[in-house]
Image (cartoon, helix red, strand yellow):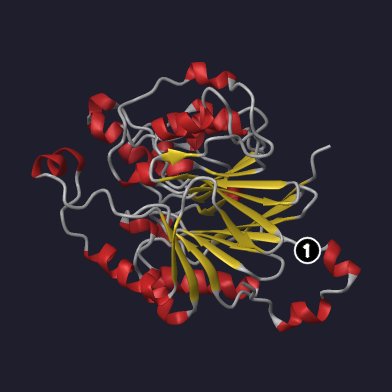
Amino acid sequence: MKNICAFTLLLLGSPAVLAAEKLEIYVLNVDLGNAVLVVTPSRQCMLLDAGPPGEEYTKLILAAMQDAGARQIDYSVVSHYHWDHYGTLPELSEKVPIRNYVDHGPNVELNRSPEWYLTHGGSKNNPLYDQYVKTREKGNHIVAQPGDRLPLEGTEVQVLTSAAQVISAPVKGGGGFNQACWLTKTMADNEQEDSQSIGVLVEFGKFRFIDLGDLPWNVSYRLFCPENKVGPVDLYLITHHALTVDKETVGEAHQSASACPPCEVYGLRPRVAILSCREDYVFRLGTPEGWQTVRHSPGLEDIWQTHYQAQGGPENNAPEQFIACPNTATSKGGDWIKVSAAADGSFVVTNKRNGFTKQYPAPK
């Protein structure tokens, strides 16, 4: 499957252009949930989650596509069926072609017992999910399995987790005992859609980016312990918005949705992490533990954020220039964190709001 714009075709044979090829990643400020646009040098396009429903979020995705020169979405990957991760897709599909819809299969939160909903939340009916199922009929529907690959030209995209299952063997660059496993105590298994999250590893030459959706603690443990099946990455979209919650406060069922266990974060050893989360989400619902685990990860250079977490204070936030929306009340919206990566492993991160840019050279 190819979607190469005419301009790229005209210049494809130029050595200078080949040397300058970049993988572009837009972490969009959609408040709740995630929306990450990945665009290859050939302008193929993958959307990892799609944010909550709302015209403003649809326009933001389209604006990022226009900025990147992408004309269609080759793969829309829905990590799981919580409304803030796929809500724009029905409207977005009316604005731009979406060729493939990738998800984990049936919704595990439907048709449960009344007692289950009292403990876990949600309801038997989900009109937005029904709308998504109807929308995906417009394209090719793919149910992802761990180990599957999405064929984006010049870029490796491997499914690491799906439907509460993880890859059976390490990927290239992974393997070996994970010393951080002893720091990670398991919790109750998560029975909600979070546990079904599709997690992907994106590789462009030596550059590695990981997005695990809202993967909860115990499923992550199986991916990283006792063997680290992934290995180090350059860029890490912080899992489940760095949510970690206390059982005594929210109960065991909701604590099971906690993310960012040390075995994951320290096993990945990211150079740069990005927190996608609205202003009052992390510390209204949880504790600073997840954010601080990332902050103290060995080898971490910076955290970038879509929003300032006011309830966390300066000690639980990145410096102002690294934040797309430092103040919700004064934000004009439409901001993103953009990553441009080269095949040698170097990359540049840019804050659209203020134009602040930082370069991360290729590892020696």
Residue nearer the viewer, 96 or 225: 225
Amino acid beneath label 1: Glu
Q: Residue at (68%, 64%) from the top-left corner?
A: 153
Q: Residue at x 80, y 49 (%)?
A: 344
Judged left or right of residue 309, residue 229 is: right
Q: Quadrant of residue 254?
A: top left
- Residue 343 in percent (x, y) is at 77, 53
Q: Quadrant of residue 163?
A: top left
Q: Give x and y (percent) for residue 93.
A: 42, 76
Does 106 appear above or below 315?
Answer: below
Whole-percent x and y of residue 75? 52, 65
- Answer with left or right where residue 256 lies relative to residue 228: left
- Identify the residue position indicated by label 1 in the image: 21
* Secondary element at image label 1: loop
User: Considering depth in this image, is 239 or 54 the residue closer to the camera?
Assistant: 239
- Location of residue 233 in the rendering, given as x and y in whole percent from the top left corner: 65, 40
Identify the residue at image location x=68%, y=39%.
Answer: 172
